[in-house]
Amino acid sequence: MLRGDRVLLRAVTKDDLVALHRLHDDVETAVVSSAAPWVPETVDHAIARYERREPDPANVVFAVESLPGGDLLGSCLVWGIDALNRNGHLGISLLPEARGRGYAPDVLRVLCDYAFRIRGLHRLGLETLVTNTAMIASAEKAGFRREGTLRDHAWVAGAFVDEALFGLLAADFS
């Protein structure tokens, strides 16, 4: 269990899957939060995939709970961990009722602590659409620096969208 000021990060359990599946079923949000094309999936398929999963040290997923209270807020991950170059990427997906309530910067700080202190990474990246102003603000509050823009990088709901690139070094994380 990893604790922040407002959130707790823990392993995803089978009991979380029905609530987290709402993130997949929200097509408009799902298409802007994943590089993979959206395809319909039932909760049963998600549970079957969960039951077949193997631990993957390069892609570590957490459930996000509120503190105190323990309400499930969403999920987050450190993905694409490159052990040789000691870098990785962060991602967050909060349920609609948890958005806009100030949880994301705390989630990012806890993920950074895990990545830098526990995993020994040197650099973290965060990529988001330039239209995702909430994520951009959260990244900046957590200490990430904007490092560039990939023009027309993401195909989202029928149009190309620019993607903003952010980075954070272990030495700059406090």
Image (spheres, rainbow, N blue to C red):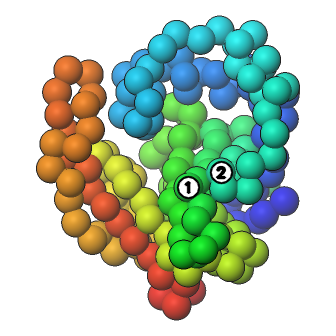
Task: Report the residue that reaches farthest toward the front.
Answer: 84
Q: Which residue is mark 1?
A: 80
Where residue 165 is drawn, which disc sits there?
none
Q: Amino acid at mark 2?
A: Asn
Amino acid type of the residue tagged 1 in the rendering: Gly
Q: Is residue 153 left or right of residue 110?
A: left
Q: Is residue 70 visible?
A: no
Q: Earlier in the sequence, mark 1 or mark 2?
A: 2
Residue, x 81% and y 46% (percent of image)? 55
Q: Which disc, if any, is residue 59?
A: 2
Asked if one can make out residue 159 in the rendered structure from this viewpoint, the answer is: yes
**Residue 120, image x, y percentages:** 68, 79
Task: List the single residue furthest toward the bottom.
Answer: 171
Asked whether the residues under the numbered discs 1 and 2 touch, taking CB atoms below 8 Å apart as contact, a structural biologist would say: yes
Residue at x-position 82% and y-position 27%: 52
Label 1, residues with CA under 10 Å away: few <14, some 14-19, many ≥20: some
Q: Quadrant of the N terminus?
A: bottom right
Cα distance in 3D space between marks 1 and 2: 6 Å
Image quadrant where residue 81 sits = bottom right
Point out the image quarter for the C terminus. bottom right
Up the image or down, 97 lies above or below 57; here it is above
